[in-house]
Every structure is written in C-alpha cells, then in structure tokens.
Amino acid sequence: MSAAQTGIPLTVLVIGSGGREHALALAISHDPTVAAVHIAPGNPGTTAIGTNHPVDICDPDAVAALAIQIGANLVVVGPEAPLVAGVADAVRAAGIACFGPSAAAAQLEGSKAFAKQVMAEAGVPTAGHRVCHDQQELAAAFDEFGAPYVVKHDGLAAGKGVLVTNDRDAALAHGAGADQVVVEEYLDGPEASLFVITDGINALALQPAQDFKRVGDGDEGPNTGGMGAYSPLPWLVPGTVDEVMTSVVAPTLARMRDLGTPFAGLLYVGLAITSRGPKVVEFNARFGDPETEALLPLLRSPLGQVLYAAATGELAKIGPLEFDDQAAVCVVLAAEGYPASPRKGGRIVLPADDDQVHVIHAGTAFDENGHLIANGGRVLVVVGTGPRLADARTAVYGRIAEIDFPDGFCRSDIAAQVI
Ligand SMILES: Nc1ncnc2c1ncn2[C@@H]1O[C@H](COP(=O)(O)OP(=O)(O)OP(=O)(O)O)[C@@H](O)[C@H]1O
Ligand SMILES: [Mg+2]
C-alpha cells in the first residue's frame, strides 16, 4: 500500500544540492499526493519549491535526525557519496522510508571491482576485465586486451578515476596512482543511460537518455560531469530496454539479493550499444546528472508515489512508468574555466520560465546583496521540451541566449547530430 493509497500525504526530504536534486524536488512537488518538499542542503533554485535545510549530507545521523525533526515520511538521497557513507541505512533505522540503496548495495557504484565481480557472477554482458594491484599485473592486462586502454580507479573519484587512452605510458601512470585498479576491454559504440527504479525485486525502467561528457563541441576536451542530455533516443533499436531489463537488471538484482545486500533505489545502467548488443559500461547507484533533468519533465507517473513504493518494497503495485510522447533536451551552462578551475562569483540574471523551458540550478548561490551568482563548475541546466527533439533544442538555445551570465559557456551541439 503506498502512502497515497492509505491517504497519508507525503512529506519528502531530498538530500543534495545540485541540478539533479533541484529536478527531483521539482518533479516530486508536482505529485498531487505530496504535501511538502524539503531539500538539504538544497540551492537557490530549490527555495522556490520547498524548504532548504543546512546539513552535512555525508553524516548519516545528522540526516536521520533532520528527517525526524521535519516529519518526513520519505527521504530521497541524490548523490552517491552519502549513499556509500550509509545515509539510507541510518534513515531506515530511524523508521523512515528511504529511496536509495544501503551502503553495502551502493558498492555497485562505490567499487568498480565489486561491480565487475557481480556482473561476472550474474552473467551480465559487459567488458572483460582484470583487477590489478601492481605494474606487472597492469602490463599483463594491457597485453591481454590491447589498445585503447581502459583504466579505472576502484573507488569513487567524482568522475576523475577513469582514463581511456591509446597511450600505454599514460595508462600505466594512471594505474600507478592507486592501490587497486580495474583494467577493461574497450567497448565500441554509442552510449546510452538507462535508469531503473527498483525495490530490490521489482524494477521499472525510465525512458533511455544520452548525455554528453566532454566539455567541448564535437566531444573535444576533458571529461566533465556532463554538459547536456536528451531523450528519447530515436537511434536506439526498439526492444533494447526490454533486452537490458532481462539480460542486465534482473540477474544483477537477483545476485545482489543472493549476496544478502539487495539493491533498492535507482540502478543507473550505463551502456555501450556495441555491434554485439548492449553491454554495461558501468553501474551507478543514483539518478544521473544531467539525464535526470531531461527525463523528469517527460515523466507522467507521480514521482513521489513511485519512489515511496520503491522505498517500501511495494513497487509491484505501480504499473509501468508513463512518459509524455514528447522530447526533451537539456544544456548545461558552466562557469568559465570548468572543469579545471571554474570561476566563481559571476553574476546571473534569469528570464522567466514558461511551459516549454525551465532553468534548473546546479551550482548557484545568492551573494550578500541577494543577487544570483555562480558557485560551482556546472551552474545552470536549461531544460526544454517539445513535440520533437528539434523543437526542444531550438527552445533551449533560444532561452540560453536570453540568460545574462557573462562568465558562462555551454556546448552548442547538444542533440544536434541526432536531429
Ligand atoms: N570499457 C570501456 N570501453 C570504452 N569506454 C569506456 C569503458 N569504460 C568506461 N568508458 C568511458 O569512460 C567513461 C567513464 O567511465 P565510467 O562510467 O566507468 O566512470 P565513472 O567515473 O564512474 O563515471 P560517472 O561519473 O558517469 O559515474 C564512460 O562514460 C565511457 O565513455
Ligand atoms: Mg560511475
């Protein structure tokens, strides 16, 4: 029985302060069964949706205490660091439903070696791999798989742990910096992100999305947290989602149950669509940024109820997720210097949102005079919808032209090629 079905209005606490959390809070607030939304710590954008609360999001006891204090009956954890730190465990121990995996299950993201082991045991299609602890093992793995070399630090590295290169010396050097690294076979093909909401047994897929990781047009320059995204993917072979649910999601969830660490929350399946079918590039244990910003405006199902059902083991009672028959594009406005050294403090003046385009805050703050300023690398995410991808794209770039943010820049080619 969901809270909605029992007539209990939801009071939701969203944990995090980025664009993903702003987008989650916004979509949750549109669910008619949601009475109140709180965000901790939140950002200037989330002040328009609910109440922000300062908290150390990686302190499990502090988050649980805040949830009790505000009377939350659902906590939604956005980023990976608090999940790996055990925030979901602490919230559940306090008797409050939490959307987000336990610390043990979040190791699917927190340890690349663990994720690869689970995939191997579950028979999931993915790149071959070796776990290496010294230069000799590294060299042997490079010989085995050949170039391009894929070297991944085992633990969370905020997007900086992975190197893909043809330069063997650079690959060796990247591996030398860590105790344990995973070397993988190179997967060729376009990438797609599939987000799956699960209670540990039942699983519901969101529509696939694609993000753009490199900072520059034409996929040039260093990797970032993501510079834009779009959905749906017109190029994806029909049936791919069902295939991935069967070949990847079901066996992974079953293996996690067998290990005694069921995975409940958001399973982010990063895929390479290779000539031999979809293969897993990586798992994450939370919604991805910025795909979430593009996907949630298209979601018709009431997000608060869906996440509550997943958090309480009742996802079987929710039908397949429904999406508008529309397209969405989002483009990130980053601060000059991102990703190496983004310039903080740049003034921002935003035009008003409308039905077609809205602006999500990712890294903003108010200065002492109450002016909106840049306060992070990725600053704003401009999200547009329309009947077709081309319409959404035109609307987004039109709105970006109206944003006054002299210190900001964006890619000009998000979703361009697919159109
Ligand atoms: N086996 C592979 N073959 C080809 N490219 C790969 C492979 N593994 C990773 N990559 C590339 O490197 C990127 C980062 O790898 P991965 O997703 O494992 O790292 P991450 O740091 O956990 O990323 P995220 O911040 O998205 O969680 C991938 O999006 C993909 O483009
Ligand atoms: Mg990852």
Image: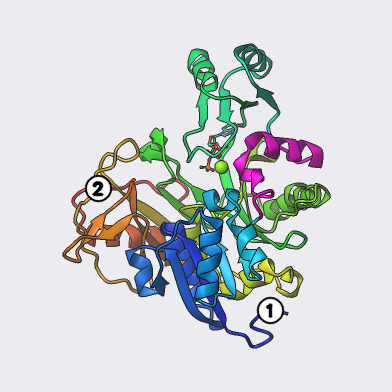
Furthest-right residue in this view: 258
Residue 279's place in the image compared with 254, above or below, is: above
Majority secondary structure of magenta residues: helix
Q: Amino acid at mark 2?
A: Lys
Which residue in the protein does label 1 denote? 2
Which one is in front, 341 or 238?
Answer: 341
| Residue range (magenta) | 102-126
Which residue in the protein does label 2 denote? 344
Furthest-left residue in this view: 369
- SS for tag 1? loop
- How far apart marks 2 and 1 lie (CA) works out to 43 Å
Q: Quadrant of ligand 1?
A: top right
Q: Is residue 70 magenta?
A: no
Residue 246 image position (x, y, % from top left): 77, 52
Residue 320's place in the image compared with 11, above or below, is: above
Q: Amino acid at mark 1?
A: Ser
Residue 230's place in the image compared with 151, above or below, is: below
Quarter of the figure with the N terminus: bottom right
Contact between labelled residues 1 and 2, with CB atoms less than 8 Å apart: no
Q: Is residue 326 visible?
A: no
